[in-house]
């Protein structure tokens, strides 16, 4: 059996049993993506436990249940064009890419993290993820519009550029609230505006940028 394969499968089984993970597509993706390749060596043994882990530069890799919940809530399907704001380690983008089967754009404001994310992604064998350095609160107009946008850092509000770069019928998922305590907000864009649905409490690092903190 491949390294950590059993641990990955057990992690997914726990997420399903706990009700965090419902989408068969996301289940398969999380069974495939080797999370241990996206964390520092000194915490590699904890890669398949359900909690965040430090990845340097004051940032973290999200807990597996949060990755599962976000991917489920986005309603990811093959062929969708996705923007991720907050590439971090690159893990979440790989899970998304496994589902959508096309290029995912992942933005990261910290150059050193972006470089590490590219290394992690390459080591894991993914060639369909583009890591872009920049202010994610402004989105990435060059690749717009997007079917789905996910933000993996907490914002005081929903950045308007992200809504503008979303297709009609698209979904945006973002933690909104205080600097370190937020609620996960699902934004659906319609012909006549947006609909916002709160999905529950969460804790993310702050979203830094022109339209964030």
Image (spheres, grey):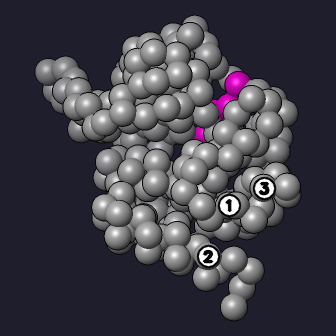
The answer, for residue 89, to whether it is visible in the render is: yes
Mark-to-mark CA distance, 3 and 1: 7 Å
The quarter in which the N terminus is drawn is bottom right
Residue assigned mark 3: 43
N-term mark: 3 or 2? 2
Residue 25: horizontal and vertical position, in percent?
39, 68
- Whether residue 76 is visible here, answered yes or no, is no
Proximity of marks 1 and 2: CB atoms separated by less than 8 Å: yes
- Point out the stretch of residues depicted in magenta: 104-109
Q: Residues within 10 Å of mark 2 (few under 14, many from 20)?
A: some
Quadrant in which the C terminus appears: top right
* Residue at x-position 82% and y-position 52%: 40
Q: Is residue 106 magenta?
A: yes
For the image, the number of numbered tags is 3
* Whether label 3 touches label 1, CB < 8 Å: yes
Q: CA distance from mark 1 to mark 2?
A: 9 Å
Position above or below: 25 against 117: below
Q: Position of residue 81 (x, y in %)?
A: 45, 47
**Residue 194 place in picture, x, y as percent:** 22, 24
Residue 157 in which image quadrant = top left
Dot 1 crowding, Cα within 10 Å, few <14, some 14–19, many 20+ = many
Under tag 1, what secondary structure?
loop
Q: Which mark is residue 7?
A: 2
Q: Please give the residue where the numbered disc 1 appears in the rendered image.
A: 47
Which residue does the image show at 83% across and 40% down from the upper left?
Answer: 115
Tag 2 or tag 1, which sits nearer the N-term?
2
Mainly helix, strand or loop, the magenta region? Answer: strand
- Residue at image x 67%, y 67%? 34
Q: Which mark is residue 143?
A: none
How many neighbours does mark 3 have within 10 angstroms: few (below 14), some (14-19), or many (20 or more)? few
- Under circle 3, the secondary element is helix
- Badge 2 marks a residue whose secondary structure is helix
């Amino acid at each position: 059996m491949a390294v950590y394969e059993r641990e990955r499968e057990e992690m997914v089984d726990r997420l399903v049993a706990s009700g965090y993970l419902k989408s068969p597509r996301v289940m398969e993706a999380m069974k495939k993506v080797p999370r241990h390749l996206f964390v520092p060596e000194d915490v590699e043994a904890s890669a398949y436990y359900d909690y965040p882990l430090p990845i340097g530069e004051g940032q973290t890799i999200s807990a597996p249940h949060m990755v599962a919940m976000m991917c489920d809530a986005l309603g990811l399907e093959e062929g969708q064009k996705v923007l991720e704001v907050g590439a971090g380690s690159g893990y979440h983008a790989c899970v998304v890419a496994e589902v959508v089967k096309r290029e995912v754009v992942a933005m990261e404001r910290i150059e050193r993290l972006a470089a590490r994310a590219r290394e992690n992604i390459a080591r894991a064998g993914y060639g369909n993820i583009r890591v872009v350095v920049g202010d994610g609160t402004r989105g990435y107009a060059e690749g717009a519009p997007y079917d789905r946008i996910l933000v993996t850092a907490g914002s005081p509000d929903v950045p308007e550029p992200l809504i503008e770069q979303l297709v009609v019928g698209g979904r945006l998922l973002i933690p909104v609230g205080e600097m370190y305590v937020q609620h996960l907000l699902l934004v659906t864009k319609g012909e006549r505006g947006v609909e916002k649905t709160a999905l529950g409490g969460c804790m993310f690092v702050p979203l830094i940028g022109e339209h964030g903190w």
